[in-house]
Image: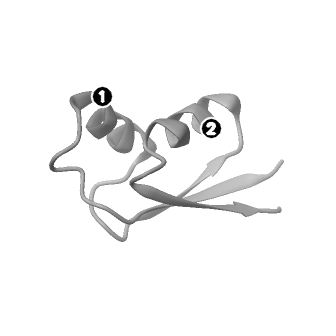
Amino acid sequence: MAKLKVTQIKSKVSEKQNQRDTLRSLGLKRIGDSVVRDDTPQNRGYVKTVAHLVKVEEIDS
């Protein structure tokens, strides 16, 4: 299964509460943090919600 590497590149300070919660549920706490998640529809939805705050790379494994 493919994986997604998600890296936070912008601050969540001025964002809506649901976007802050989404970053937290992805496991991102601060700028520069990265997590590797499975490429599932749920995780794709999370990334779509905060697309302007993160950088996403697909990793084949």
Does dot 2 land on a helix, a strand or a loop? helix
Numbered label attached to residue 37: none
Residue on which the image places disc 2: 44
- Direction from residue 10 to residue 43 in the image, left or right: right
**Image coordinates for residue 19, horizontal then vertical, percent:** 32, 36
Q: Which residue is found at the position 27% from the left and 61% from the top?
A: 30
Residue on which the image places disc 1: 18
**Image coordinates for residue 36, horizontal then vertical, percent:** 58, 57
* Of 34 and 49, the residue lying toward us: 49
Quadrant showing the C terminus: bottom right
Q: Residues within 10 Å of mark 1 (few under 14, many from 20)?
A: few
- Direction from residue 40 to residue 46 in the image, left or right: left
Q: Where 25 falls versus 3 (above or below)? A: above
Q: Where 10 falls versus 47 (above or below)? A: below
Q: Where 60 falls versus 40 (above or below)? A: below
Cα–Cα gap, marks 1 and 2? 16 Å
Q: Which residue is found at the position 31% from the left and 62% from the top?
A: 10
What amino acid type is highlighted by mark number 1? Asn
What amino acid type is highlighted by mark number 2? Arg
Upstream in sequence: badge 1 or badge 2? 1
**Image coordinates for residue 27, horizontal then vertical, percent:** 40, 48
Q: Residues within 10 Å of mark 2 (few under 14, many from 20)?
A: some
